[in-house]
Amino acid sequence: MRRKTNAPTLDDVALAAGVSRASASRAIRGEVRVSPEVLEAVQRAVKDLGYVPNRAARSLATQRADAITVIFTETVEHVFGDPFFATTMRGISEVLDAAGKQLVLLLRTSTHDHTHIGYLTAGHTDGVVVVSHRTDDEVGEALSALDLPVAFVGRPPQQMSTANYVDTDNRAGGALVANHLLKQGCRKLAIVTGNLEMPVGIDRLEGWRQALRDAGVDASGVYEADFTVTTAYEATLRLLEEHPDVEGIFAASDLMAMGVARAVEENGKSIPDDIRLVGYGDLPDVSDMRVPLTTVVNPGVEMARLATRMVLDEITGDLVDGSIIVPPKLIVRQSG
């Protein structure tokens, strides 16, 4: 025979806290429409009683899964090897932990991989945060057909141009780098881009090119990589072979700056004496490399937090602003 347990219920918590059952439920869910006094009383009652929310019962009552899905259109190696993705995951998980929501991670290894759609339509999630996406990615079209709150970290693809998103002004960031190198006296310049099938790669390149054109400087030195150390290293070897007199290089991410620096040093040149180098990201694992990296801040943690809050606010009907653009900021260090 199964023993009957006397586990505390939500009604017990409400009684102990001296509030209504609805107020206790809102406080436990982390909703913003709860006064500090009620929140403190409910948290104290939860602790004293040892109350553990019944997620399954709550989902049935609210018709919500209490889970948010995070989608990356990247390989497993790229997601777990790029520090930027680690910072975004940290920001997302912080917000979801505080709200009592589960995080579900979907990695899509192909832009034509539709296996995730069945999961999203089966009621397992209340909303979606998209962190990495490409212009030819069908995730935008698929998500637009679903009745789910969605927010992008980064400018969304064209087919979801009206979607909620948080991004830095990557065009302005690319221009900021170009103008900085020009002020340092560099005139023979080149860029090692990110993937040009991704909005972020396109925007940083366009900002860079426009600033150089406005200054009357040749903007044809463009070498495409894929936001990885290896592809940036290989692109820089080609760059140095074709333009051995280059004076300044813009690596469109800090991770790629590591590959650029390696190629430059292997060619017997030094940073910044022979070639000035600027990255993008201000990632702690990169900015303190042997020659500290001049870079543009890309606040991955904060952007991820904001995008996640957008999804949660849309679920509760409290969403005010559907897009946020963070202005770029250049951090000058020794490399550039």
Image: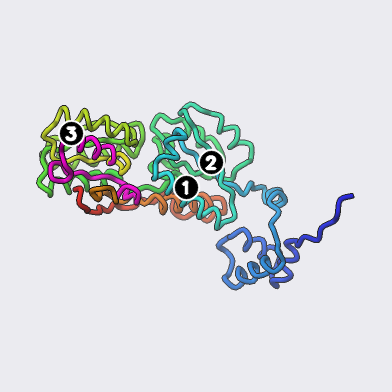
Disc 1 residue crowd, few under 14, some 14–19, many 20+, Cα 10 Å: many
Of labels 1 and 2, earlier in sequence is 1
| Residue 15 position within the rendered picture, expressed as x and y whole percent measured from the top left | 74, 70
Quadrant housing residue 127: top right
The reply to whether discs 3 and 2 touch (Cβ–Cβ < 8 Å) is no
The reply to whether discs 1 and 2 touch (Cβ–Cβ < 8 Å) is yes
Tell me: 78 left or right of 313: left
Of labels 3 and 1, earlier in sequence is 1
Q: Amino acid at mark 3?
A: Asn
Of labels 3 and 2, earlier in sequence is 2
Residue at 47% over, 28% down: 110
The magenta stretch is 258-287
Label of residue 89 in the image: 1
Q: Is any atom of residue 189 visible in this view? A: yes
| Residue 179 magenta-highlighted | no
Quadrant housing residue 278: top left
Residue at 46% over, 49% down: 307
Q: Give the colour scheme shown.
A: rainbow
Disc 2 residue crowd, few under 14, some 14–19, many 20+, Cα 10 Å: some
Circle 2 residue = 105
Label of residue 267 in the image: 3
